[in-house]
Image: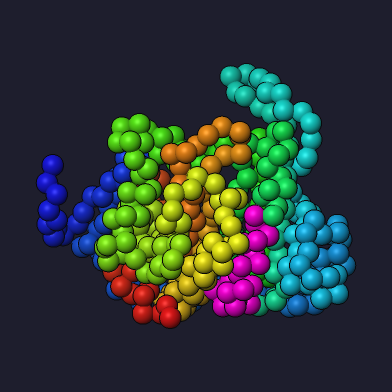
Amino acid sequence: MKKNKTNYSSELRQDIISDDWMIVAIGRAKRPHLFIKKHKERFEQKISDCPFENPQATGHEEPLLIYGNEKKWSLQVIKNKYPMLIPGNSFEIYKEGPYNVMQGNGFHEIVITRDHKKHLAIMPIEKVEEVIKAYQERYLALMNHKFVNYIFIFHNHGKEAGASIPHPHSQLIAVPILPADVRRSIEDTEKYYVRNKKCAHCEMINWEKEEKRVIFQNKYFVVFAPFVPRVNFELRIYPKQHQPNFEKINETEKKYLAEALQKALYGLYKGLKNPNYNFFIHTAPCDEKKHDYYHWHIEILPKTNTWAGLELGTGVEVLTIKPEEVAEFLKKYIH
């Protein structure tokens, strides 16, 4: 297999973990500024109508976690008033014809920051650190419930990204199953480790630190546009040191992670003029098994792609900007 790069009009790139291929359609390439949505639907809500401005006054239960006090709080975690899953004690799988079914038991929580308009990209880094601290605190509180197999932490920014309320908030969902995308990520990482005796994510990090796709790095974390992205302008944040479990980050690492996350989101905010995006944390399951081959990370996926027939029918992503150009473009906006 050739190691040297050749410039083609289009490229097929293969992910080293999943073995999936994607297309960089250079013939359809766009300049970075063309990804800015000029007629984006306004997504606003009056403070007086916002259910998160004073959660307890709008029917939410007392906070599970609060920073500050009830009158002057900077962050609180509450139970979702309309949860996808609810706590329960029945985890028996039963049959419905050829299908498996179980009750929808779990936990669904919301992490709310105080400022109605100041989202993560434009928050002071110490406030972003509070959010990460809350993620960890609630993760640790939920992980020891006997039926919790995985805790998914995610953030939707903008209506197109699935946010139903514009007030900045993240969500935690604790489930008794291993979600499909996470399962594939973990299983494929294990297969790579068995074949190569190395962590696939560490391999990517070591390579990317020397390449031109890095947009920011500090002592403990690196942010880069992955070689095989799932969407245009995808970014990933990795701890430089190998660690399977997000919840094991220490106080110093939380400060540096807050900086890396804020810088990544700020780059997108300035470069793409506040795009809709999702980010989520992929971490090892809390199933009491060892997953030493895994490497936790954050994936940031801006809403820059619309799936058409090829993507829906084959699962093959089509990108119209190289991640190398993404990194070069975004670095200009990160101080």
Q: Position of residue 203 (x, y in %)?
A: 32, 49
Residue 56 seen: yes
The verdict on residue 156 being magenta is: no
For the stretch drawn in magenta, the main secondary structure is helix
Q: Position of residue 62 (x, y in %)?
A: 86, 59
- The residue shown at (69%, 54%) is 137
Quadrant of the rendered structure where residue 78 is? bottom right
Q: Is residue 60 left or right of residue 95?
A: right
Q: Position of residue 273 (x, y in %)?
A: 47, 78
Coloring scheme used: rainbow
- The residue shown at (58%, 19%) is 98
Quadrant of the rendered structure where residue 38 is? bottom left
- The residue shown at (72%, 33%) is 146
The answer to which of 108 and 204 lies nearer the viewer is 204
Q: Is residue 183 above or below residue 128?
A: above
Q: Is residue 2 above or below residue 113?
A: above
Residue 322 seen: no
Quadrant of the rendered structure where residue 91 is? top right
Q: Tell me the quadrant of the picture where the C terminus can be found.
A: bottom left
Q: Position of residue 232 (x, y in %)?
A: 37, 62
The answer to which of 194 and 79 lies nearer the viewer is 194
Q: How many marks?
A: 0
- The residue shown at (71%, 23%) is 92
Which portion, as a residue range, is magenta? 118-136
Q: Tell me the quadrant of the picture where the N terminus can be found.
A: top left
The verdict on residue 129 being magenta is: yes
